[in-house]
Amino acid sequence: MNILAPSLLAVDYNNIEANIRLLEESNVSWLHLDVMDGYFVPNISFGEPVIRCIRKITKLYFDVHLMVINPIRYIDDYVKAGADSITVHYEACEDLSATIAAIKAHNIKVGVSIKPDTPVSLLKPYMNDIDLILVMSVEPGFGGQAFMPSALDKLSKLKQMVAQAGRPIDLEVDGGITIQNVKQVIEAGANVIVSGSSVFKGNVVENVERFSNILTEN
Ligand code: DX5
Ligand code: ZN
């Protein structure tokens, strides 16, 4: 089943609750939460206090994407804030195995993300330990960037690696996903689709409906 994970980064921050209600009414089940430290990526977004607040107003599945150096320092905080899954960056971890173990110790889902220049083969040693792989299809740090087609080949390769692993691992794609290119990323192998601007710019309900139609058809 394909899943739409709207990225809150692109929301109108004056109307977070109203927008979350629109997502819920549109049968969205996941919310993608981009945490940026201004160091691993050249931008600062929001962190644990904001996620904790939003947790109080919704039961949506919180898909937390940590774009943070040495994220192992913050795992407990984001679990307490209400994360249902935590995805860390391959490039940001001093000890990825220990970071994965720290997340799994809380009985939540664990994901690993790779930036556009990071080869998929580096994830091979972790295929038995992770629930999700997040392929960045832009350089992480900002919403509204153009999709990098090099992500398609990475998704296809990962789809094969997941099949070889013989266990369920979600393949998530993040960055520049639009109504126009979403079919392509699904065909390449993605089953969790992050979208910020293409969901929150304009009419949220209509945007979600357009995505959902394509996600259920493919
Ligand atoms: C970028 C973030 C994305 C971003 C996607 O570093 O990880 O989740 O919000 O935004 P769009 O869909 O606008 O590219
Ligand atoms: Zn993200």
Image (cartoon, rainbow, N blue to C red):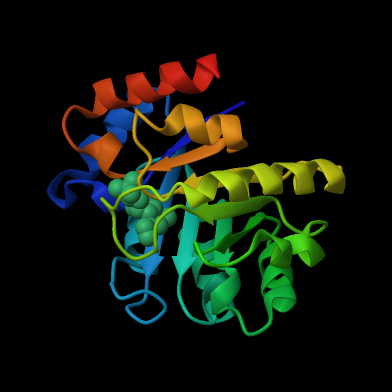
In this rendering, the answer to whether 144 lies above or below 212 is below
Taking the image as shown, residue 102 lies to the left or right of residue 166, namely left
Query: Which residue is at a point 37% across and 74% down the rendered structure image?
Result: 41
Q: Position of residue 173 (x, y in %)?
A: 50, 46
Number of numbered callouts drawn: 0
> What residue sits 55% from the left and 19% below the top?
218
Quarter of the image where the N terminus is located: top right
Residue reaching furthest to the left:
14
Is residue 202 shown left or right of residue 29?
A: left
- Which quarter of the figure has residue 208? top left
Indicate whether 103 appears above or below 206: below
To which quarter of the image does residue 199 belong? top left
Of residues 107 and 144, which is closer to you in this image?
A: 144
Residue depicted at x 37% and y 82%: 39
Can the viewer see residue 52 in this picture? Answer: no
Q: Residue 118's x, y, as percent?
A: 58, 67
- Is 186 placed left or right of 132 in the picture? left
Could you tell me which residue is drawn at 63 percent across and 64 percent down? 119
Q: 163 and 109: which one is in front?
A: 163
Placement of 26 over or under 147, stated as above or below: above
Horizontal side of residue 144 vs 99, given as left or right: left
Q: Is residue 79 visible?
A: yes
Q: Position of residue 162 (x, y in %)?
A: 77, 45
